[in-house]
Amino acid sequence: MTKPKQDERDRVAALIDHNLRLVYSDLAKEDLPDRFKDLLAVLKAQDTESGSKS
């Protein structure tokens, strides 16, 4: 089996990069699930409480 040429490897890498960007941009547009929003609210409240005790 022969090793792919550099231009072919670059093309494949560019395709992978492009597809990952598409998937990520779709995910970034989605709302967070309620359980994550709740968890973030709890963590923020804990952070606020610990900040006021200092």
Image (spheres, grey):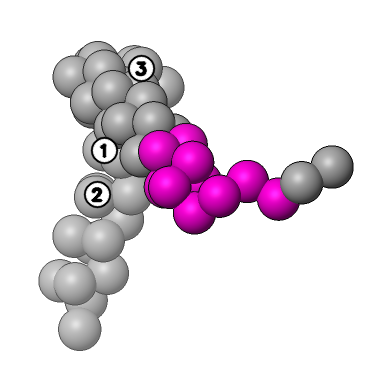
Mark 2 against mark 3, which lies toward the viewer? 3
Mark 3 against mark 1, which lies toward the viewer? 3
Boundaries of the magenta span? 3-13
Mark 3 is surrounded, within 10 Å at the Cα level, by few (under 14), some (14 to 19) or many (20 or more) other residues, namely: few
The disc placed on residue 41 is: 1
In this image, 10 relative to 5: left or right?
Answer: left
Residue highlighted by disc 3: 33
Q: Is residue 30 visible?
A: yes
Magenta-colored segment: predominant secondary structure: helix
In this image, 16 relative to 51: left or right?
Answer: right
Q: Is residue 33 above or below residue 48?
A: above
The disc placed on residue 45 is: 2
Q: Secondary structure at mark 2?
A: helix
In this image, 54 relative to 36: left or right?
Answer: left
In this image, 27 relative to 16: left or right?
Answer: left
User: Closest to the observer: 54 or 12?
Assistant: 12
Residue contact at pointers 1 and 2, CB within 8 angstroms: yes
